[in-house]
Amino acid sequence: MIPANMLKFYINGQWVDPVSTARLGVENPATEEIVCEVAMGNREDADRAIMAARAAFDGWTYTPVKDRIALVKRILEVYNARYEDFAQVMSTEMGAPITWARNAQAWAGQVHIEATIKAAEEMVWEYNRGSTRIVYEGIGVCSLITPWNWPMNQIACKVAPALIAGCTMVLKPSEIAPLSGTLFAQVLHDAGVPPGVFNLVHGAGPEVGARMSEHPEVDMVSFTGSTRAGTAIAAAAAPTVKRVAQELGGKSPNIILPTADIAEAVAAGVNAVMSNTGQSCDAPTRMLVPRARQAEALAAAKEAAEAIVTGDPRDEATVLGPLVSKLQFDKVQRLIQAGIDEGATLVTGGVGRPADLNRGWFVRPTVFGDVVNSMTISKEEIFGPVLAIQPYDSIEDAIRQANDTVYGLAAYIAGPVEDAKPVARKLRAGTVNLNYPDWDTSAPFGGYKQSGNGREYADWGIHDFCEVKGIVGYGE
Protein backbone atom coordinates (compact mmCIF):
# COMPACT_ATOMS: atom_id res chain seq x y z
CA MET A 1 0.00 0.00 0.00
CA ILE A 2 1.10 3.57 -0.72
CA PRO A 3 0.13 6.18 1.90
CA ALA A 4 -1.93 9.16 0.85
CA ASN A 5 -0.35 12.61 0.71
CA MET A 6 3.02 11.61 -0.74
CA LEU A 7 2.97 14.88 -2.73
CA LYS A 8 2.14 17.02 0.32
CA PHE A 9 3.87 18.03 3.54
CA TYR A 10 2.38 18.01 7.02
CA ILE A 11 2.69 21.56 8.40
CA ASN A 12 0.73 23.20 11.22
CA GLY A 13 -1.72 20.33 11.49
CA GLN A 14 -2.61 20.13 7.79
CA TRP A 15 -1.48 18.39 4.64
CA VAL A 16 -0.31 21.26 2.46
CA ASP A 17 1.09 21.66 -1.04
CA PRO A 18 4.85 22.26 -1.12
CA VAL A 19 6.37 25.48 -2.38
CA SER A 20 8.80 23.38 -4.40
CA THR A 21 7.54 21.54 -7.47
CA ALA A 22 10.36 18.96 -7.44
CA ARG A 23 9.51 15.26 -7.30
CA LEU A 24 11.49 12.07 -6.74
CA GLY A 25 10.53 8.54 -7.75
CA VAL A 26 10.32 6.05 -4.88
CA GLU A 27 11.77 2.71 -5.93
CA ASN A 28 10.96 -0.76 -4.69
CA PRO A 29 14.54 -2.09 -4.50
CA ALA A 30 13.42 -5.69 -4.93
CA THR A 31 11.92 -5.00 -8.36
CA GLU A 32 13.61 -1.73 -9.42
CA GLU A 33 10.12 -0.38 -10.14
CA ILE A 34 9.00 3.15 -9.22
CA VAL A 35 5.97 2.75 -6.96
CA CYS A 36 5.13 6.45 -6.50
CA GLU A 37 6.63 9.92 -6.34
CA VAL A 38 7.43 11.97 -3.25
CA ALA A 39 7.45 15.76 -3.12
CA MET A 40 10.93 17.19 -2.57
CA GLY A 41 10.95 20.37 -0.53
CA ASN A 42 13.26 23.36 -0.55
CA ARG A 43 14.51 25.89 2.00
CA GLU A 44 11.22 27.79 1.95
CA ASP A 45 9.28 24.60 2.76
CA ALA A 46 11.65 23.97 5.68
CA ASP A 47 11.16 27.56 6.88
CA ARG A 48 7.36 27.17 6.88
CA ALA A 49 7.56 24.02 8.97
CA ILE A 50 10.11 25.47 11.40
CA MET A 51 8.07 28.62 11.99
CA ALA A 52 4.94 26.52 12.59
CA ALA A 53 6.88 24.59 15.24
CA ARG A 54 8.13 27.84 16.78
CA ALA A 55 4.61 29.27 16.99
CA ALA A 56 3.34 26.10 18.68
CA PHE A 57 6.16 25.80 21.21
CA ASP A 58 4.86 27.82 24.15
CA GLY A 59 1.44 26.21 24.06
CA TRP A 60 2.89 22.72 23.96
CA THR A 61 5.82 23.01 26.36
CA TYR A 62 3.58 24.42 29.13
CA THR A 63 1.10 21.58 28.68
CA PRO A 64 1.31 19.38 31.80
CA VAL A 65 3.58 16.35 31.47
CA LYS A 66 0.70 13.98 32.19
CA ASP A 67 -1.18 15.39 29.20
CA ARG A 68 1.86 15.06 26.95
CA ILE A 69 2.22 11.43 28.04
CA ALA A 70 -1.49 10.84 27.38
CA LEU A 71 -1.06 12.10 23.82
CA VAL A 72 1.84 9.73 23.17
CA LYS A 73 -0.32 6.89 24.50
CA ARG A 74 -2.95 7.80 21.91
CA ILE A 75 -0.24 7.81 19.24
CA LEU A 76 0.71 4.28 20.31
CA GLU A 77 -2.91 3.14 19.99
CA VAL A 78 -3.20 4.51 16.46
CA TYR A 79 0.22 3.13 15.53
CA ASN A 80 -0.80 -0.33 16.69
CA ALA A 81 -4.00 -0.12 14.63
CA ARG A 82 -1.84 0.60 11.53
CA TYR A 83 0.88 -1.91 12.44
CA GLU A 84 0.50 -4.11 9.36
CA ASP A 85 0.41 -1.03 7.13
CA PHE A 86 3.80 0.01 8.51
CA ALA A 87 5.22 -3.46 7.84
CA GLN A 88 3.94 -3.39 4.27
CA VAL A 89 5.24 0.09 3.42
CA MET A 90 8.70 -0.62 4.86
CA SER A 91 8.86 -3.85 2.91
CA THR A 92 8.04 -1.84 -0.21
CA GLU A 93 10.30 1.16 0.30
CA MET A 94 13.44 -0.60 1.54
CA GLY A 95 12.95 -4.19 0.43
CA ALA A 96 12.72 -5.56 3.96
CA PRO A 97 11.51 -9.19 3.98
CA ILE A 98 7.93 -9.05 5.19
CA THR A 99 8.56 -11.25 8.24
CA TRP A 100 11.45 -8.98 9.26
CA ALA A 101 9.36 -5.89 8.50
CA ARG A 102 6.71 -7.11 10.93
CA ASN A 103 8.93 -8.60 13.65
CA ALA A 104 11.71 -5.99 13.65
CA GLN A 105 10.99 -2.86 11.62
CA ALA A 106 7.37 -2.16 12.62
CA TRP A 107 8.00 -3.66 16.06
CA ALA A 108 10.85 -1.20 16.70
CA GLY A 109 8.53 1.77 16.40
CA GLN A 110 6.05 0.17 18.77
CA VAL A 111 8.52 -0.75 21.50
CA HIS A 112 10.32 2.60 21.42
CA ILE A 113 7.05 4.43 22.00
CA GLU A 114 6.22 2.00 24.82
CA ALA A 115 9.66 2.40 26.43
CA THR A 116 9.44 6.19 26.23
CA ILE A 117 6.01 6.23 27.88
CA LYS A 118 7.23 3.99 30.71
CA ALA A 119 10.34 6.12 31.24
CA ALA A 120 8.31 9.34 31.25
CA GLU A 121 5.91 7.99 33.86
CA GLU A 122 8.84 6.99 36.10
CA MET A 123 10.90 10.13 35.55
CA VAL A 124 11.18 12.79 38.27
CA TRP A 125 10.56 15.99 36.32
CA GLU A 126 11.11 18.39 39.24
CA TYR A 127 12.84 18.05 42.61
CA ASN A 128 14.56 20.11 45.27
CA ARG A 129 18.27 20.12 45.99
CA GLY A 130 18.43 22.15 49.15
CA SER A 131 16.66 25.41 48.39
CA THR A 132 17.14 25.05 44.62
CA ARG A 133 14.38 23.65 42.44
CA ILE A 134 15.70 21.46 39.60
CA VAL A 135 13.34 21.46 36.60
CA TYR A 136 13.53 19.54 33.31
CA GLU A 137 12.07 21.50 30.39
CA GLY A 138 11.82 20.94 26.64
CA ILE A 139 14.79 22.41 24.80
CA GLY A 140 12.65 24.07 22.10
CA VAL A 141 12.15 23.55 18.37
CA CYS A 142 13.91 20.40 17.15
CA SER A 143 14.98 19.32 13.68
CA LEU A 144 14.78 15.54 13.40
CA ILE A 145 16.62 14.00 10.45
CA THR A 146 16.29 10.23 10.09
CA PRO A 147 17.72 7.50 7.81
CA TRP A 148 16.22 4.85 5.55
CA ASN A 149 17.64 1.69 7.11
CA TRP A 150 15.51 1.60 10.31
CA PRO A 151 12.74 4.08 9.51
CA MET A 152 10.38 3.55 12.44
CA ASN A 153 13.14 2.77 14.91
CA GLN A 154 14.75 6.15 14.38
CA ILE A 155 11.57 8.18 13.94
CA ALA A 156 9.93 6.77 17.08
CA CYS A 157 12.99 7.11 19.30
CA LYS A 158 13.23 10.81 18.36
CA VAL A 159 9.60 11.92 18.05
CA ALA A 160 8.23 10.21 21.18
CA PRO A 161 10.79 11.62 23.66
CA ALA A 162 10.74 15.04 21.98
CA LEU A 163 6.95 15.21 22.37
CA ILE A 164 7.04 14.12 25.99
CA ALA A 165 9.87 16.53 26.82
CA GLY A 166 7.68 19.39 25.58
CA CYS A 167 9.45 20.10 22.30
CA THR A 168 7.96 20.96 18.94
CA MET A 169 9.60 19.57 15.84
CA VAL A 170 10.13 19.17 12.13
CA LEU A 171 10.86 15.67 10.83
CA LYS A 172 12.72 15.01 7.59
CA PRO A 173 12.73 11.28 6.88
CA SER A 174 15.04 9.88 4.25
CA GLU A 175 13.77 10.68 0.78
CA ILE A 176 14.90 7.19 -0.27
CA ALA A 177 12.36 5.53 2.03
CA PRO A 178 9.66 8.17 2.64
CA LEU A 179 6.50 6.05 2.75
CA SER A 180 6.72 5.11 6.43
CA GLY A 181 7.45 8.69 7.49
CA THR A 182 4.35 9.97 5.69
CA LEU A 183 2.26 7.21 7.26
CA PHE A 184 3.65 8.11 10.69
CA ALA A 185 2.64 11.75 10.20
CA GLN A 186 -0.91 10.56 9.47
CA VAL A 187 -0.85 8.51 12.69
CA LEU A 188 0.10 11.63 14.69
CA HIS A 189 -2.63 13.63 12.99
CA ASP A 190 -5.23 10.97 13.74
CA ALA A 191 -4.04 10.80 17.37
CA GLY A 192 -4.75 14.51 17.78
CA VAL A 193 -1.31 16.11 17.97
CA PRO A 194 -1.93 19.89 18.20
CA PRO A 195 -1.19 21.95 15.07
CA GLY A 196 2.45 22.89 14.69
CA VAL A 197 3.76 20.54 17.36
CA PHE A 198 4.81 17.96 14.76
CA ASN A 199 5.62 18.84 11.16
CA LEU A 200 6.97 16.77 8.27
CA VAL A 201 8.90 17.90 5.21
CA HIS A 202 10.56 15.63 2.65
CA GLY A 203 13.65 16.68 0.78
CA ALA A 204 17.35 16.24 0.15
CA GLY A 205 19.90 16.62 2.92
CA PRO A 206 22.03 19.30 1.23
CA GLU A 207 18.98 21.57 0.86
CA VAL A 208 16.21 20.81 3.36
CA GLY A 209 18.47 19.09 5.90
CA ALA A 210 21.00 21.91 5.72
CA ARG A 211 18.31 24.54 6.31
CA MET A 212 16.91 22.59 9.25
CA SER A 213 20.42 22.48 10.73
CA GLU A 214 21.29 26.17 10.35
CA HIS A 215 17.93 27.87 10.97
CA PRO A 216 18.15 30.36 13.87
CA GLU A 217 14.73 29.32 15.23
CA VAL A 218 15.86 25.71 15.70
CA ASP A 219 17.25 24.87 19.14
CA MET A 220 18.37 21.29 18.57
CA VAL A 221 19.20 18.93 15.72
CA SER A 222 18.88 15.18 16.25
CA PHE A 223 20.43 13.31 13.35
CA THR A 224 20.99 9.68 12.48
CA GLY A 225 23.04 8.86 9.40
CA SER A 226 26.54 8.90 8.00
CA THR A 227 29.52 10.46 9.73
CA ARG A 228 30.11 12.59 6.63
CA ALA A 229 26.63 14.12 6.82
CA GLY A 230 26.91 14.44 10.59
CA THR A 231 29.98 16.63 10.39
CA ALA A 232 28.23 18.91 7.86
CA ILE A 233 25.23 19.23 10.18
CA ALA A 234 27.43 20.06 13.16
CA ALA A 235 29.19 22.76 11.15
CA ALA A 236 25.88 24.25 10.00
CA ALA A 237 24.52 24.26 13.55
CA ALA A 238 27.62 25.76 15.19
CA PRO A 239 27.02 29.48 14.49
CA THR A 240 23.76 29.43 16.48
CA VAL A 241 25.16 27.12 19.20
CA LYS A 242 22.42 24.53 18.83
CA ARG A 243 22.53 21.26 20.66
CA VAL A 244 23.42 18.55 18.14
CA ALA A 245 22.77 14.88 18.97
CA GLN A 246 24.15 12.44 16.43
CA GLU A 247 24.09 8.69 15.90
CA LEU A 248 26.50 8.07 13.07
CA GLY A 249 28.47 5.27 11.46
CA GLY A 250 29.93 2.14 12.97
CA LYS A 251 32.37 -0.69 12.37
CA SER A 252 31.55 -2.85 15.35
CA PRO A 253 33.93 -5.56 16.52
CA ASN A 254 32.73 -8.97 17.69
CA ILE A 255 35.27 -10.76 19.88
CA ILE A 256 34.78 -14.53 20.00
CA LEU A 257 36.55 -15.56 23.20
CA PRO A 258 38.74 -18.68 23.28
CA THR A 259 36.32 -20.13 25.86
CA ALA A 260 33.28 -19.65 23.58
CA ASP A 261 31.55 -22.38 21.63
CA ILE A 262 33.17 -21.28 18.37
CA ALA A 263 30.69 -22.81 15.94
CA GLU A 264 27.67 -21.50 17.82
CA ALA A 265 29.11 -18.03 18.43
CA VAL A 266 30.27 -17.61 14.83
CA ALA A 267 26.93 -18.71 13.37
CA ALA A 268 25.08 -16.27 15.62
CA GLY A 269 27.50 -13.53 14.61
CA VAL A 270 26.94 -14.21 10.91
CA ASN A 271 23.18 -13.99 11.34
CA ALA A 272 23.54 -10.74 13.29
CA VAL A 273 25.54 -9.17 10.45
CA MET A 274 23.20 -10.37 7.72
CA SER A 275 19.95 -9.24 9.38
CA ASN A 276 18.41 -6.17 7.73
CA THR A 277 20.65 -7.06 4.75
CA GLY A 278 23.64 -5.77 6.70
CA GLN A 279 22.16 -2.26 6.73
CA SER A 280 22.54 -1.55 10.45
CA CYS A 281 25.02 0.93 11.85
CA ASP A 282 25.72 -1.27 14.88
CA ALA A 283 26.10 -4.57 12.97
CA PRO A 284 29.01 -6.75 14.24
CA THR A 285 30.88 -6.60 10.95
CA ARG A 286 34.42 -7.31 12.27
CA MET A 287 34.62 -10.75 13.86
CA LEU A 288 37.78 -11.40 15.90
CA VAL A 289 38.59 -15.08 16.45
CA PRO A 290 41.54 -16.91 18.08
CA ARG A 291 44.15 -17.43 15.38
CA ALA A 292 44.49 -21.14 16.21
CA ARG A 293 40.77 -21.61 15.58
CA GLN A 294 40.28 -19.42 12.52
CA ALA A 295 39.80 -22.40 10.19
CA GLU A 296 37.01 -23.69 12.41
CA ALA A 297 35.44 -20.22 12.49
CA LEU A 298 35.59 -19.84 8.72
CA ALA A 299 33.89 -23.19 8.21
CA ALA A 300 31.10 -22.25 10.63
CA ALA A 301 30.68 -18.85 8.99
CA LYS A 302 30.50 -20.37 5.51
CA GLU A 303 27.83 -22.84 6.58
CA ALA A 304 25.75 -20.15 8.30
CA ALA A 305 26.00 -17.64 5.44
CA GLU A 306 25.11 -20.19 2.77
CA ALA A 307 22.02 -21.25 4.73
CA ILE A 308 20.51 -17.76 4.57
CA VAL A 309 17.45 -17.55 2.31
CA THR A 310 17.79 -14.63 -0.11
CA GLY A 311 14.96 -13.56 -2.36
CA ASP A 312 11.51 -12.05 -2.73
CA PRO A 313 10.68 -9.88 0.31
CA ARG A 314 7.01 -10.84 -0.01
CA ASP A 315 7.87 -14.48 0.78
CA GLU A 316 7.61 -15.02 4.53
CA ALA A 317 10.53 -17.48 4.38
CA THR A 318 12.93 -14.86 2.98
CA VAL A 319 15.63 -13.71 5.41
CA LEU A 320 17.83 -11.51 3.21
CA GLY A 321 16.24 -8.89 0.99
CA PRO A 322 17.87 -6.40 -1.37
CA LEU A 323 19.94 -3.37 -0.52
CA VAL A 324 17.96 -0.15 -0.60
CA SER A 325 19.26 1.31 -3.87
CA LYS A 326 21.60 0.99 -6.81
CA LEU A 327 23.91 3.51 -5.15
CA GLN A 328 24.19 1.27 -2.11
CA PHE A 329 24.54 -1.84 -4.29
CA ASP A 330 27.42 -0.30 -6.25
CA LYS A 331 29.18 0.75 -3.05
CA VAL A 332 28.95 -2.74 -1.55
CA GLN A 333 30.16 -4.34 -4.79
CA ARG A 334 33.17 -1.99 -4.80
CA LEU A 335 34.06 -2.88 -1.23
CA ILE A 336 33.69 -6.64 -1.80
CA GLN A 337 36.07 -6.31 -4.75
CA ALA A 338 38.45 -4.31 -2.55
CA GLY A 339 38.53 -7.18 -0.06
CA ILE A 340 39.46 -9.60 -2.86
CA ASP A 341 42.05 -7.24 -4.35
CA GLU A 342 43.72 -6.55 -0.99
CA GLY A 343 44.28 -10.23 -0.27
CA ALA A 344 41.55 -11.28 2.15
CA THR A 345 40.38 -14.88 1.79
CA LEU A 346 36.93 -15.02 0.17
CA VAL A 347 35.14 -17.73 2.14
CA THR A 348 31.74 -17.43 0.46
CA GLY A 349 29.76 -14.95 -1.60
CA GLY A 350 31.56 -12.32 -3.64
CA VAL A 351 30.63 -9.76 -6.27
CA GLY A 352 27.41 -9.87 -8.24
CA ARG A 353 23.85 -10.89 -7.49
CA PRO A 354 22.88 -14.35 -6.24
CA ALA A 355 22.73 -16.72 -9.22
CA ASP A 356 18.92 -17.02 -9.27
CA LEU A 357 18.18 -13.30 -9.13
CA ASN A 358 18.51 -11.07 -12.19
CA ARG A 359 16.89 -7.87 -10.94
CA GLY A 360 16.70 -5.98 -7.68
CA TRP A 361 19.64 -4.79 -5.60
CA PHE A 362 20.41 -8.18 -4.09
CA VAL A 363 23.90 -9.01 -2.81
CA ARG A 364 25.42 -12.39 -2.12
CA PRO A 365 25.96 -13.00 1.62
CA THR A 366 29.74 -12.62 1.80
CA VAL A 367 32.36 -13.73 4.32
CA PHE A 368 36.07 -12.89 4.26
CA GLY A 369 38.82 -14.49 6.35
CA ASP A 370 42.44 -13.53 7.08
CA VAL A 371 41.46 -9.88 7.35
CA VAL A 372 43.79 -7.34 8.96
CA ASN A 373 42.93 -3.89 10.25
CA SER A 374 44.72 -2.10 7.42
CA MET A 375 42.34 -3.54 4.80
CA THR A 376 39.53 -1.40 3.44
CA ILE A 377 36.87 -3.94 4.46
CA SER A 378 38.08 -3.67 8.06
CA LYS A 379 38.12 0.13 8.12
CA GLU A 380 35.14 1.30 6.05
CA GLU A 381 31.49 0.90 6.96
CA ILE A 382 30.17 -1.36 4.18
CA PHE A 383 26.46 -1.33 5.08
CA GLY A 384 25.76 -4.62 3.38
CA PRO A 385 25.78 -8.38 4.15
CA VAL A 386 29.57 -8.63 4.39
CA LEU A 387 31.53 -10.07 7.33
CA ALA A 388 35.28 -9.64 7.87
CA ILE A 389 36.90 -12.30 10.10
CA GLN A 390 40.20 -11.30 11.71
CA PRO A 391 42.48 -13.59 13.75
CA TYR A 392 43.97 -12.51 17.08
CA ASP A 393 46.83 -13.89 19.18
CA SER A 394 45.71 -12.95 22.71
CA ILE A 395 42.84 -11.19 24.46
CA GLU A 396 44.97 -8.06 24.65
CA ASP A 397 45.53 -8.27 20.89
CA ALA A 398 41.79 -8.71 20.33
CA ILE A 399 41.00 -5.63 22.43
CA ARG A 400 43.66 -3.61 20.59
CA GLN A 401 42.25 -4.61 17.20
CA ALA A 402 38.68 -4.00 18.34
CA ASN A 403 39.49 -0.45 19.44
CA ASP A 404 41.62 0.32 16.39
CA THR A 405 38.87 2.18 14.53
CA VAL A 406 37.56 5.73 14.26
CA TYR A 407 34.13 4.40 15.22
CA GLY A 408 32.71 3.40 18.59
CA LEU A 409 28.99 2.74 18.27
CA ALA A 410 28.79 -0.86 19.45
CA ALA A 411 30.86 -3.94 20.26
CA TYR A 412 30.06 -7.60 20.81
CA ILE A 413 31.63 -10.37 22.88
CA ALA A 414 30.73 -14.07 22.74
CA GLY A 415 31.76 -16.47 25.50
CA PRO A 416 31.12 -17.15 29.19
CA VAL A 417 29.76 -13.98 30.79
CA GLU A 418 32.39 -13.89 33.55
CA ASP A 419 35.12 -14.05 30.91
CA ALA A 420 33.40 -11.36 28.84
CA LYS A 421 32.84 -8.78 31.59
CA PRO A 422 36.45 -7.60 31.99
CA VAL A 423 36.86 -7.41 28.21
CA ALA A 424 33.69 -5.30 27.92
CA ARG A 425 35.19 -2.71 30.26
CA LYS A 426 38.08 -2.14 27.86
CA LEU A 427 36.11 -1.67 24.64
CA ARG A 428 35.59 1.93 23.51
CA ALA A 429 31.99 1.70 22.38
CA GLY A 430 28.65 3.09 23.50
CA THR A 431 26.98 -0.32 23.68
CA VAL A 432 28.72 -3.63 24.41
CA ASN A 433 26.56 -6.70 23.77
CA LEU A 434 27.37 -9.95 25.56
CA ASN A 435 26.30 -13.15 23.79
CA TYR A 436 23.85 -11.51 21.36
CA PRO A 437 21.24 -10.42 23.93
CA ASP A 438 17.69 -9.40 23.11
CA TRP A 439 17.21 -5.78 22.06
CA ASP A 440 16.91 -3.62 25.20
CA THR A 441 14.99 -0.42 24.40
CA SER A 442 15.68 0.95 27.88
CA ALA A 443 19.47 0.77 27.46
CA PRO A 444 21.30 3.90 26.30
CA PHE A 445 22.12 3.88 22.59
CA GLY A 446 24.80 6.08 21.05
CA GLY A 447 28.44 6.17 20.14
CA TYR A 448 31.96 7.05 21.13
CA LYS A 449 34.43 8.77 18.78
CA GLN A 450 33.17 9.36 15.23
CA SER A 451 30.04 7.32 15.89
CA GLY A 452 28.42 10.37 17.41
CA ASN A 453 27.29 11.90 20.67
CA GLY A 454 24.20 11.91 22.84
CA ARG A 455 22.13 8.90 23.80
CA GLU A 456 18.75 7.64 22.63
CA TYR A 457 16.05 5.27 23.96
CA ALA A 458 13.70 5.61 26.95
CA ASP A 459 14.78 8.13 29.62
CA TRP A 460 18.12 8.64 27.88
CA GLY A 461 16.29 10.03 24.88
CA ILE A 462 14.01 12.22 26.98
CA HIS A 463 16.99 13.80 28.73
CA ASP A 464 18.61 14.61 25.37
CA PHE A 465 15.58 16.77 24.48
CA CYS A 466 15.53 18.59 27.83
CA GLU A 467 17.19 21.64 29.30
CA VAL A 468 17.91 21.60 33.04
CA LYS A 469 16.88 24.72 34.97
CA GLY A 470 17.92 25.53 38.51
CA ILE A 471 15.60 27.94 40.34
CA VAL A 472 17.90 29.08 43.15
CA GLY A 473 16.26 30.30 46.36
CA TYR A 474 13.06 28.46 45.53
CA GLY A 475 12.77 27.12 49.08
CA GLU A 476 11.71 23.80 50.47
Image: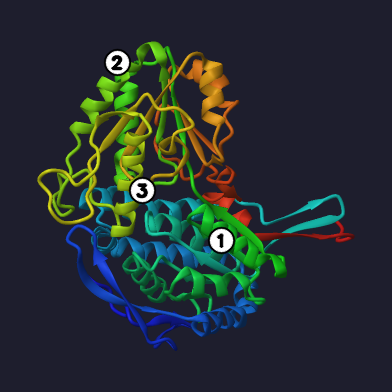
Q: Earlier in the sequence, mark 1 or mark 3?
A: 1
The image shows residue 71 at horizontal and vertical percentages of: 48, 68
Q: Looking at the rendering, which quadrant does residue 318 occupy?
A: top left
Which residue is tagged 1? Answer: 222
Q: Quadrant of the N terminus?
A: bottom left
Which residue is tagged 3? Answer: 279
The one of 278 and 74 positioned closer to us in this rendering: 278
Q: Could you give the CA–CA distance between mark 1 and mark 3, rounded to whole angstroms?
A: 20 Å
Q: Is residue 324 left or right of residue 448?
A: left
Numbered-mark total: 3
Up the image or down, 329 lies above or below 399; here it is below
Q: Is residue 457 left or right of residue 16?
A: right
Q: Are marks 2 and 1 in contact (CB under 8 Å)?
A: no
Q: Are marks 1 and 3 in contact (CB under 8 Å)?
A: no
Up the image or down, 472 lies above or below 216; here it is above
Residue extending farthest front: 341
Q: Amino acid at mark 3?
A: Gln
Q: Earlier in the sequence, mark 2 or mark 1?
A: 1
Q: Secondary structure at mark 3?
A: loop
Q: Secondary structure at mark 1?
A: strand
Q: Secondary structure at mark 2?
A: helix
Which residue is tagged 2? Answer: 296
Up the image or down, 131 lies above or below 193; here it is above
State the residue at coordinates (63%, 67%).
Answer: 236
In the image, which is nearer the foreground, mark 2 or mark 1? 2
State the residue at coordinates (58%, 49%).
Answer: 452
The one of 421 and 399 positioned closer to us in this rendering: 399
In the image, which is nearer the foreground, mark 1 or mark 3? 3
For disc 2, the neighbor class at 10 Å (few under 14, some 14 to 19, many from 20) is: some
Q: Could you give the CA–CA distance between mark 2 and mark 3, rounded to whole angstroms?
A: 27 Å
